[in-house]
């Protein structure tokens, strides 16, 4: 175990909450009995890890996070596995991505073993909260906030790293249902030199307006185009986007404007294992529509921790509406979903060593 985590103190709740009915779980609405907190202060570094009863935290109203949004977050899940125990999926990748995000918004680096060990320690305490019902899991939300009470504009010199847990239901209650996507032609979420590849709350705040307008038009999510020309395809909502054209898979490259998804990386690895050609390269929305018009676009899907694989059934760009796959999930989308969830739950062999048993 990590040295710092050997100093972990645990205070258990004296009033455990009633657990929700696993059949009615939504996403991120219910939280478990405990949370992990680690403090950072300039000169001391990260110190005093604790697990304490889940409760509101008290911060100075001048804390930097409230004013200049110096904040980052992560998301991963733990599953009840086929053999009964719990498994995490590639938690080392979340730790690495945290440090890349931290680097971008001037939050101090955090030891990656400490990070994974802290996740494990908290899950262990609240393991009775992992729902055991088809499609459910325990969502893990690590995040870091700037806590220094100071209104000047410079990086904070104190932070809190917190982990909370939330039992979540299946993303799609009635099985994988294709979504309707609005191609965003006005707002952008990212551009070269900006923070599109960092997992920060600020990226989400600036995307809300677009999401609200898309909902008003009857669409579930937006497809983001590049911030400069609004031509190149980037991401779908808060997940990575894939297009199957002539049996080959296309997705935007990691050039700094999109979030490097762990599910994206897993999808690409599985495709390469199967010998399916993949292209991580820039391509335009015109090319997607041309392929659709010519009957060469067979599937569109999004990838992310929450839904794993989310098939797209319809897209609207300006006044051009296309349907994909006739309202059904495509064969490749289904196969990727089954493969990734199969590895996560231990039903399929984990040939890449992606899962960590607890
Ligand atoms: C988190 C996130 C993703 C998906 O990443 P995963 O690691 O696969 O969950 C994609 N895009 C954005 C903008 C994200 O914030």
Image: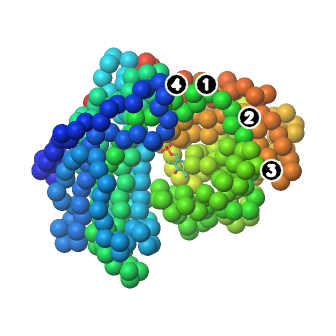
Query: Which is closer to the viewer, label 4 or label 2?
Result: 2
| Whole-percent x, y for residue 78 in the image | 37, 33
Mark 4 crowd level (few <14, some 14–19, many ≥20, 10 Å Cα): some
Residue 173 vs residue 199, the one in the foreground: 173
| Whole-percent x, y for residue 199 in the image | 47, 56
Q: Is mark 4 within 8 Å of ligand 1?
A: no
Q: Are marks 1 and 4 in contact (CB under 8 Å)?
A: no
Q: Secondary structure at mark 1?
A: loop
Q: CA distance from mark 1 to mark 2?
A: 15 Å
Residue 346 vs residue 213, the one in the foreground: 213
Mark 3 crowd level (few <14, some 14–19, many ≥20, 10 Å Cα): some
Q: Which residue is mark 4?
A: 339
Q: Secondary structure at mark 2?
A: strand
Q: Which mark is residue 174?
A: 1
Q: Which residue is mark 3?
A: 317
Q: Which residue is mark 2?
A: 313
């Amino acid at each position: 175990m990590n040295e710092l985590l050997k100093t972990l103190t645990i205070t258990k709740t004296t009033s455990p909450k009633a657990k929700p009915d696993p059949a009615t779980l939504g996403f991120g609405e219910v939280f478990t009995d405990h949370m992990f907190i680690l403090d950072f202060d300039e000169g001391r570094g990260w110190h005093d890890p604790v697990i304490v009863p889940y409760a509101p935290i008290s911060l100075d109203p001048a804390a930097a996070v409230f004013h200049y949004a110096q904040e980052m977050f992560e998301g991963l899940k733990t599953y009840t596995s086929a053999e009964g125990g719990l498994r995490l999926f590639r938690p080392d990748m979340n730790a690495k991505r945290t440090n890349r995000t931290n680097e971008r918004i001037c939050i101090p680096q955090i030891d990656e073993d400490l990070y994974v060990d802290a996740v494990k320690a908290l899950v262990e305490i609240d393991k009775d909260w992992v729902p055991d019902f088809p499609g459910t899991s325990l969502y893990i939300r690590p995040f870091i906030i700037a806590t220094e009470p100071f209104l000047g504009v410079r990086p904070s010199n104190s932070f809190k790293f917190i982990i909370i847990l939330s039992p979540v239901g299946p993303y799609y209650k009635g099985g994988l249902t294709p979504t309707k996507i609005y191609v965003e032609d006005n707002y952008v979420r990212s551009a070269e030199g900006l923070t599109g590849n960092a997992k920060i709350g600020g990226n989400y705040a600036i995307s809300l307006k677009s999401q609200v307008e898309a909902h008003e038009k009857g669409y579930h999510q937006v497809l983001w185009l590049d911030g400069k020309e609004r031509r190149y395809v980037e991401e779908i909502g808060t997940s990575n986007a894939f297009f199957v054209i002539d049996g080959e898979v296309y997705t935007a490259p990691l050039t700094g404007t999109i979030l490097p998804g762990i599910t994206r990386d897993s999808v690409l690895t599985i495709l390469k294992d199967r010998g399916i050609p993949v292209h991580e390269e820039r391509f335009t929305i015109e090319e997607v529509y041309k392929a659709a018009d010519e009957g060469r676009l067979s599937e569109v899907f999004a990838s992310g921790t929450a839904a794993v694989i989310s098939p797209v059934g319809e897209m609207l760009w300006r006044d051009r509406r296309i349907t994909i796959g006739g309202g059904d999930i495509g064969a490749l989308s289904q196969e990727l979903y089954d493969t990734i969830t199969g590895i996560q739950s231990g039903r399929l062999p984990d040939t890449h060593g992606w899962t960590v048993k607890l």
